[in-house]
Amino acid sequence: MNRLHHIKKTLPANIKANKDYAKIEFVVLDYNSSDGLEEWINENYQENLSTGKLVFKRTNKPTRFLWSHSKNMVHKMATGDIVCNVDADNFTGQGFATYLNEHFQNNPNNFLSVNYNDKINHLSDTFGRIACFKKDFETIGGYDERMRWYGYEDNDFCERLKRMGKEQYFIEDKEYLDAIQHDAADRFKNNTKVTNLKSVYINYVSPLTSKIMFLFNDDNCLLGTIEDLNKGLGTPTINEGQWVAGIYRFSSETKLVVHTGEIVNQYQLNNGNLIDDKNQIYYQIIDEKFLKNLEVQYAIIANHQILVENLERGIIKVNI
């Protein structure tokens, strides 16, 4: 969504880099963009569209970017036996399609991905690069669409492929792992649930456990108790299973009322902080750097919780 500034650089480069592979099919999804992607494609790629080398589709339905749903849409549009996700900011590298075809010819039980555990080569911008047989994609139901945020949808996809018996092979040639560098803000600007944050309050239960309340500008809120079971070495767990959704209102200048389902909680405002009926203090976070990190982390934690659930339950197929 709204990545034309990246597509203008990557699409022509990727088509040129893979011209040696005659049966290649580039599938581009316009996920309700407002930056002129459809017009740019039609103005510049009529020949590729007519030959089928480029497949283009626009959807006007989503109001915000959903990572798993958009990936599933574009994979379902593909007609080849092998499908590979290439994010809008990624360069495939010279002869990447030929490389994939040759690998799968010799290793039909494989799927290919980036090594998520590589801490040396800074590959995070290419983590979405996953290739598999389309029949395997369909067998596991694609990407889990309960993951409506950024992070871990690729890990979960790979783990479910492994649980169905497929072997993971890492793409290691750096020529195939190039991407346009950009900050996290570019990833989140089209997901209003992340960018619509009004304020955050935290109740520090213990050094490893905190209760967090996110208030958004549209009167919605998310609450949860996060526990760092890995002592800073991994993503925290939400004890409630997922962020608890609710709505809030200020009934007066000094009182906040939060509704989560049939449960109603009231908080007193005191010097910018909140105090609940058990006299527990929820401190308002005002540090800008900390807030920016929280905006990213609350989304990542939500997806991570689903990854853990799928692992614990041994789930292979999703979106049933």
Image: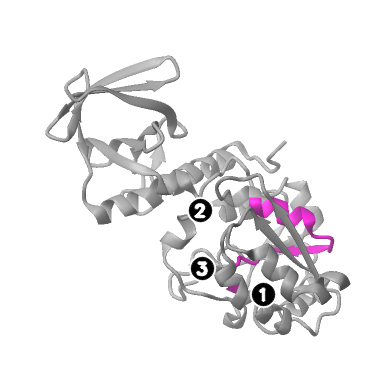
Snapshot quadrant of residue 57: bottom right
Identify the disc placed on residue 11: 1
**Tag 3: amino acid:** Asp
Measured from the top left, where is residue 213 in percent x and y? 32, 34
119 and 224: which is toward the camera: 224
30 and 188: which is toward the camera: 30
Measured from the top left, where is residue 315 in percent x and y? 65, 40
Snapshot quadrant of residue 167: bottom right
**Tag 2: amino acid:** Asn
> Which residue is tagged 2?
190
Measured from the top left, where is residue 289 in percent x and y? 26, 56
Give the side of residue 242 with respect to residue 142, left or right: left
Magenta region includes residue 81: yes
**Earlier sequence position, callout 3 versus callout 1:** 1
- Quadrant where the C terminus sits is top right
**Earlier sequence position, callout 1 versus callout 2:** 1
Marks 3/1: CA distance? Answer: 16 Å
> Which residue is tagged 3?
125
Q: Residue at x 58, y 76 (%)?
A: 177
Magenta region: 70-91
